[in-house]
Image (tube, rainbow, N blue to C red):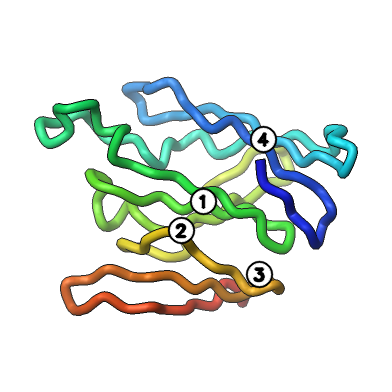
Amino acid sequence: MIWHAPAGRFFAFQTQCNPNQDATCHRTAWWLGRDLNVVETLLLPAEDLLYQPEKLACFSCGCGCYTQENIYAVNGKIYVHASGFPLSYQRRGLYEVVQADNGTSTWRHVIRGRIEPPLAFSPSGCNVAFFKVSYFGDALQTQSLCN
């Protein structure tokens, strides 16, 4: 559960998925008021960002042991950071949850690549700072999220 101070409410979400061979993950999320009453219910996108077919490199406890998901509520938007081995470089990064008018949602991949937690967002939600790991040199970077 995440406290979103500017909105004065909490964001709660199901943290786990049952592994599915079709790489889907059906999870519900809720915006809660200060008194923990449900203000809004939404479905997170069905695509499981952490899905990885099992392979020999994950033999000790399964690929799920090595992946990580961090969720951020920033200026009314929800971001999910997917990281960890064995996710491909193209799959890793920061995603925004985009809500459609019909109640469904999709992922928008806003930063690609190997960025490591924790992330820091500006109060406006327009900028994010992160540590990017690269073969060309590791560095602290910032990126604009607003158009």
Mark 3: give few (<14), some (14-19) or many (20+) Cα within 10 Å. Answer: some
Dot 1 lies on which element? strand
Q: Is residue 50 left or right of residue 7?
A: left
Badge 4 amino acid: Ala
| Residue underneath mark 1 | 80
Q: Is residue 88 left or right of residue 5?
A: left
Q: CA distance from mark 2 to mark 1?
A: 6 Å
Q: Which mark is residue 94?
A: 2
Mark 1: give few (<14), some (14-19) or many (20+) Cα within 10 Å. Answer: some
Please tell me which of labels 4 and 3 falls first in the chain.
Answer: 4
Badge 2 amino acid: Leu
Counting from the top left corner in percent of width and height, residue 141 is at 41, 78
Residue at the (72%, 63%) spot, across then down = 75
- Cβ–Cβ under 8 Å for marks 4 and 1: no
| Residue underneath mark 3 | 125
Please tell me which of labels 4 and 2 falls first in the chain.
Answer: 4
| Residue underneath mark 4 | 29
Please tell me which of labels 3 and 2 falls first in the chain.
Answer: 2
Badge 3 amino acid: Gly
Residue at the (49%, 77%) spot, across then down = 143
Give whichever of 129, 146 is nearer the camera. Answer: 129
- Cβ–Cβ under 8 Å for marks 4 and 2: no
Counting from the top left corner in percent of width and height, residue 146 is at 62, 74
Badge 1 amino acid: Val
Give whichever of 105, 26 is nearer the camera. Answer: 26
Vertically, is 90 above or below 57?
A: below
Counting from the top left corner in percent of width and height, residue 17 is at 47, 26
- Cβ–Cβ under 8 Å for marks 4 and 3: no
Q: CA distance from mark 4 to mark 2?
A: 18 Å
Residue at the (31%, 61%) spot, across then down = 114
